Image (cartoon, rainbow, N blue to C red):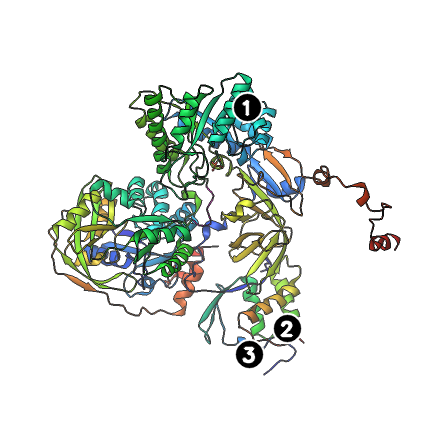
Amino acid sequence: MSVLRVAVSGMHLGENCQPGPGVVRSLREALGDRVHVVGLAYDVFDSGLHADGLLDDAFMVPYPSAGPAAYLERLSQIRELVGLDVLIPCLDVELPVIQRIAGALAERGIHTVMPSTEALARRTKDQLPALAAALGIATPRTITVTDAAGLAAAGAELGYPLVVKGPFYEAEVTHGAAEAQAAFGKLAARWGLPLLAQQFVKGEEFDVIALGDGQGGVHGAVAMRKTVITKLGKAWGAMTIHDDELLAVATKVISALRWRGGCEVEMLRAPDGTPYLIEVNPRFPAWVYLATAAGTNLPQGLVELALGRPVPKYPPYRAGVFYVRHAVEACGELADLESLMAYGRTRRPTLASLPELIANG
Amino acid sequence: MPTPDLPYDPAELRTLALSDTGFIFDPRTGHSYSANATGLATLAAMKDGLDPAAIATKLRAEFKGGAAVEDDVAGFVDLLRELGLVRARSAP
Amino acid sequence: MADRIYERPAIVRNTFGAMNKVGRRGDLSNHAEIDGVSIDALCKEFGSPLFVFSERRLRARVREAREAFARRYPSTTMCWSYKTNYLDAICAVMHQEGSIAEVVSGMEYDKARRLGMPGDKIVFNGPAKTETELRRAVAERAIIHADHLEEIYLLEKIAAETGATPTVGVRVSLDAGIYPRWDRFGLGLENGQAMQAVKRIARGGKLALGGLHTHIGTFVLEPAAYGRAAAKLADFATEIEKSMGVRPTHVDLGGGFASTNTLATQYHAGAIAPGIGDYAEAITSALIAGASGTGTLPRLFIETGRALIDEAGTLLTSVVATKRLSTGKRAIVIDAGVNLLFTAWWYRLNIAPARSAEAFVEDTAVYGPLCMNIDCIRESVPLPDLRPGERLAIHPVGAYTVTQSMQFINLRPAVVMINEQGTPELIRRAEVLEDLTGPEVLPERLKLGATTSGATPALKIAREG
Ligand SMILES: Cc1ncc(COP(=O)(O)O)c(C=O)c1O
C-alpha cells in the first residue's frame, strides 16, 4: 500500500493546547510508515514543528484572516512540493476558509471532511441556545454583547460570576462588572465583536469526542471527565467514562446537525444531575489521543471518511483510561528557525540547494 | 580597533550572524531579524568597516535603480540604532 | 549582479507570535490594472487620487443578485439604494439593469426624478421627510414607507387637502436576532406600534395600505437574520389580512447584505462573507413558508446597496512621502484620506501597490493628506518599499465613499467608469475651486480693498507694503 500524505494544522502545545499533535500521534499509531505527515504552522515557534519524531515535514501557511485565495494558493504550492491526499484542519478559525475552498482542494486531490455550512452556523456560540432549545437540552443562558453597555446589562441580567466568551476561542469567568469589562476589552481586541455573555453554571465538566458521518450517524464517540483544569479553564488531565446519558446528548446534537467530521461536545453536569450543553467545537479536541488510547482512533476514521472509504466499526472503548499532560522542551537550532522564516518550510538536508522552494519569492 | 570616523562601530556588528536568506541573528540578545537584499548587503559592508559613502557605491554597483542611496544608508544606520544593533554615536 | 532592483535597505525585528512570512500573503497582491486599463495610465489621464468604477463588475453583480432572487421567487423588485452611491452614471446603470430607485431624502428624490424615474418607481424611505417632499411624492404616486405616526398624520392631512388617497406603507422595526438592533427607525413590531400604524392607515379612511418595509441593519453577516425578519413580516402581513381584510401591496426587506469588504472588527477576510444567494435563500424560503397560510406570495422589494457596488469601486492614490515613526514603524503619506474614504473607519480596506510586491514587505501605516491625526487609512498593512509618486489601489470602495466624501481642505477628485468595452469614461470631473466658492457670498464690506472702516490697519499695511 502506498504512503498517504496527510496535512495537519494546529501544531502548538502551549498554554492553549491545539489538537494537531494528538491527531498526528493517532495517525502514526494506526498507519505507521504508511503515513507521511505534513504539519501546517502559523508561527515558527509552533511547538509541534520542533518536537522529535512528530512530523515528517512542515510548512508555514497564511493566517486564515488572509482569506481563502491565499490559503488555496499555499496549499496548492505545498501539494506540488510534497503531494497531499488529506487535509485535517484542527483550528476553528480555519474552517470557514477551508469550507470555501474544499471543492477546489478536492479537484487537486486534497480531500477534507467538512461539516455543512448550516451545521457550522447552527453550533456557533450565539446560535447554540436555539439549537439546545430545539432539542430539549439544557444550556446556560447566553446574551450577545457588542459594547460595554450591553455587557453591563447582560451582567445585571445573568448575574456574576459571568462567563465572557470570544466568538471562536477563549472564555473568562468574571466575578464582577469591572472584571467583565476588562475581559470584554481583551477578547474584543483579539477576536472582534460580538462577544457572548453567558450565565455561569456550576458543575463537573465532561466532554465527548465524536466522528459524525454527515447523515446523522456517529462512527464513534468517547466521553471523558476532566480531572485537571488549568487556570484558563482547559483540561490538563481527564479520564474516559461510560456515561450513556452524556453520550446520548452528544449523539442527539450530532444527529440534529448531521455533523460530518470530528467534533467535541462540551457539557457540564449541574449539582442536580442535569447535563448542560456548553459548546460544540467543530474539530477534534486537543485531547483526541486519549480516545485513541482508550481504543477509538477517530483521526484514522476521519482519514477513511475523507478518502471515501468505509470507516471500520469501532469496538467499545475502555473506561478508566486517563491522561495527564506532560510538557517537554522541544529544542531546535538557529538553522531550523531560519529555514522556517526564509523558506516557510522545516529544515531538510536538501533545502539549501533547492532555491525553487523559496516560498515567498 | 575603534574607527572614530565611522558613524557606527563595526566591532559591534562582529558577532551578528548574517545569512544569505536575509535572516539575521544577534547572539548577544537572542533576537532575530529579517532584512531585504540591500539591507543585508549594507550590514555586511558595515561589518567589514566600510564607510557610508563606500557602502553607497557598493550598493549602486550591485543593484540597479538606486537614487538617494547615501540618504538611504544613513536612514538604515539610524534604524539599526533604533533596534539596538549599533549604539548611538555622533556622526563625524 | 547589477540586475537586482534597488530597494531601500530595510530590516525588521522578528517578533514572537508573528514569525510567519507567508502569514499575510493575502494582503500582498498587486493591482496593476482594472478591467485591462493600467492604473498608471488612468492616473496620468485623470489625475490622482481617482475613483474608478468597473461597469463590467457592477453589471455582473447586479445580474447575479437579480438572478439569485428570480431563481427562487416569482416577483422581486430591486430598488437601488441611492445613498450608497448616487452618481448619475451609477444610478443609470442600475436603472438600465431594471432597478427602481430607493431614496431617503428630498434631494435623492429630486435626483431620481431628474434621471427620469417616474414617481411610482421611487421608493421613498427616510426618517425625516418634509411636508413639501411628501406632497410631491403623493402627487407623483411614489411608494412611500412611513417612518413614524406623525408622518402618517401629515399624509392624512395632505390627502384631505388634495382629495387624493395616497398609498402608504409602514417601516417596521423588528427583532431579527442581530445586534445592534436598529430600533430607532420605523415602528416597533413586537410592541404593537406597527399594527397601530397599519390600522390607522387601513381604517382611517384617508389612506390606502401600501407595503411593509424593514431594514434590519447594514453589513449583516448572518443570512438567517433575514430569514427571521422575512418570516416576521410574512406573519404580520397574514395577521393584517386576517384582521382587516386588506393585504399589504409588498414586503420590502431593505438592504444590509455584506459586501466582500472586511469589517475592522471581523477576524476573517471579507471574502468569506455570505453570497447574495445565501441572503436570497433565507428571505425567499421564509416568505414561501410564511405564505402557506394565505396561499399568495407578496411582491418582494430588495434595497441592497453596498453588496452591489462596493466591489466595483477602486480608489487610485499616489504616495506623497515615506517616513519612520518614533517607534521605528514605517509609514507612508498618500494623497487620499478619510475625506474620501469615510469607510476606512470601519473597514480594513485592501491597499495594493500597482507594481508587483517584492519579497520583502514591512508593516506600514498608511496616512492620508489631512492635517488631522484621525486621517489614517490603515494602521498596519504589509507593503513593499514605496517611493513618492508610486500608485496604490484601495479596494473595495464603491459604497458610501463618493456620497459620504467630505470637501475638507481638498477638492474632490474625478470619478471614471470603465465601460464594458474597457474604455474609461469620465463620470464626474475633478472639482475646481469655483465648485466650492460658487455658493458663497462675500459681503461687499469684507472684500479686500474695501474702503469701509472695517479694514484693519494690518490689512492696510499688508496692501501698502
Ligand atoms: C432604508 C434603507 N435601505 C437600504 C439601505 C442600503 O443598505 P446597504 O448598503 O447596507 O445594503 C439603507 C442604508 O442605510 C437604508 O437605510
Q: CA distance from mark 2 to mark 1?
A: 77 Å
Q: CA distance from mark 1 to mark 3?
A: 82 Å
Q: Is residue C260 visible?
A: yes
- In screen coordinates, is C102 left or right of A34? right
Residue C151, position as x, y percentages in the image? 50, 29
Residue B85, position as x, y percentages in the image? 53, 72
Instruction: Provide the chain ID for the residue under circle 1.
Output: C
Residue designated by label 3: B11
SS at mark 2 in the image: loop
* The N terminus of chain B lies in quadrant: bottom right
Dot 3 or dot 2: first in sequence order is: 3
Question: Which label sits in the foreground, 2 or 1?
Answer: 1
> Within 10 angstroms of label 2, few (less than 14), some, or many (20 or more) residues?
some
Question: Which label sits in the foreground, 1 or 3?
Answer: 1
- In screen coordinates, is C402 left or right of C272? right
- In screen coordinates, is A120 left or right of A360? left
Magenta stretch? Answer: C260-265
Identify the image quadrant of residue A352. bottom left
Q: Residue furthest bottom?
A: B1
The three-letter code of the residue at mark 1 reads Ala
Residue designated by label 1: C137
Q: Residue furthest top?
A: C163
Residue designated by label 2: B51
The three-letter code of the residue at mark 3 reads Ala
Instruction: Provide the chain ID for the residue under circle 3.
Output: B
